[in-house]
Each structure stands twice: as structure tokens, then as C-alpha cells.
Amino acid sequence: MQVTPFSDQQLIARYLEGDERSFEELLSRHKQKIYTSIYLFVKDQSLAEDIFQEVFIKIIDTLRKGKYNHEGKFVQWAMRISYNMCVDYFRRTKRRPKVAPTETFDIFDVLQVTDDNAEQRIIKSQTHERIRHLVDQLPPEQREVVILRHYADMSFKEIAKLTRVSINTALGRMRYALINIRKMVEQKEVILQ
């Protein structure tokens, strides 16, 4: 007999009834996506870990105070909290996030890639590096939409809600990001393949 896993809402209810393991399950279910989205914004492993912990402290506090409503999905709510904490961090430090790989993390590592021969892998790696460099040069609002859409796999409706803009604004930012990337490719004669 196969056991059906509890939904996020069921895990939250069980946690509020005193079952600590339910929260551990909820955390393990979503921690990779939430941590990685934080890391993409702050580009610093220890800072991402700190913000990640703050996010879950805030989540626990909100749940315990009974202020969480079940209108949206848990992961979208948690992503909104993590996004807001990253924005707060950048406002305090007046730093801008950069999309760049590090020794321990590369956004393109999370993308599914079919087995290629060595030459194809080298070309793909060089292409990813060029794209990352171009995305990094976008204005912050456009860069943000590209990250949320292509890494966090969020819909434009979710991006609009998270960034507190209209769907048309989110779509417009993506459109301008693509136009700007295309212009940079043409101006710099960047070869993407």
C-alpha cells in the first residue's frame, strides 16, 4: 500500500498541532528552491544561508501567530518572504545583485541537460557564460524578472505579485530584457552558439 504524502496545508496544520516533524518535512520539500532563489540574488553562500534562516524564522513566527492564510500555495508565500528579505538586504547595503557563477553554484547546473559530447558541452558552457554576462548587464528590474522566470520557473502572474507590479509591467520588463540582450548580442557581435 502506497502512502500519499501530506499536502503543504496538511503539514502546516499538523505542525500547528505540535508535530515538529511535519515542519521538517515542509522545509525539506522546499528548501532547495527557496535557498537557491536567495542565493541567486545575494551571490554569497554564507549570506544566503543567513537570509534563508531568517526566512524560516519568519515563517515559523507567522504560522505560530495564526497569521498565515491558505489562499496561495505555501512555496509562493515563502518565495515572496525570501524575495522581500533579499530586497531589504540590498536596500540596507545599497548593493545590487549580480548573476554570476561561483565555485559552488551555477544557475545552469540546475537546468536539465541531455548527454552531449565534449565539444557540445564546451560550446554549451561558453554559451551559458556569455548569456550570464549579458543578463548581468541588464537593469535590475529586468534582471530580476529574468531570474524569477527562468530560474524560479515562476509565472508572470506570480512574478507580478512577488515584485508588486502589474502583470503587464512584469511582461514589459521581460520584453525589454530580451530586446536589450538582442541589442547587446548585435552590438558586441556575441556568438551564442
Image (cartoon, grey):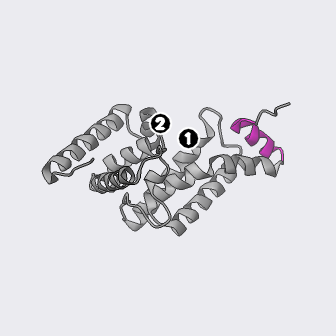
The number of numbered badges drawn on the structure is 2
Residue 150 is situated, as x and y percent measured from the top left of the image, at 42, 43
Please, which residue is most extreme toward the left here? 187
Q: Which badge, 2 or 1, comes first in the chain's sequence?
A: 1
Q: Which mark is residue 158?
A: 2
In the image, which residues are magenta? 6-18
For label 1, the SS is helix
Residue 73 is situated, as x and y percent measured from the top left of the image, at 60, 36
Q: Which mark is residue 76?
A: 1
Picture layout, residue 8 above or below residue 41: above
Query: Quick check: is 85 in the magenta stretch?
Result: no
Q: Is residue 134 left or right of residue 43?
A: left
Residue 74 is situated, as x and y percent measured from the top left of the image, at 62, 40
Q: Is residue 1 left or right of residue 156?
A: right
- Please tell me which residue is depicted at 41% across the width and 50% down the height of the picture: 117
Mark 2 belongs to which amino acid? Answer: Glu
Picture layout, residue 172 above or below residue 61: above
Mark 1 belongs to which amino acid? Answer: Gln
Is residue 10 visible in this depiction of the protein? yes
Is residue 65 visible in this depiction of the protein? no
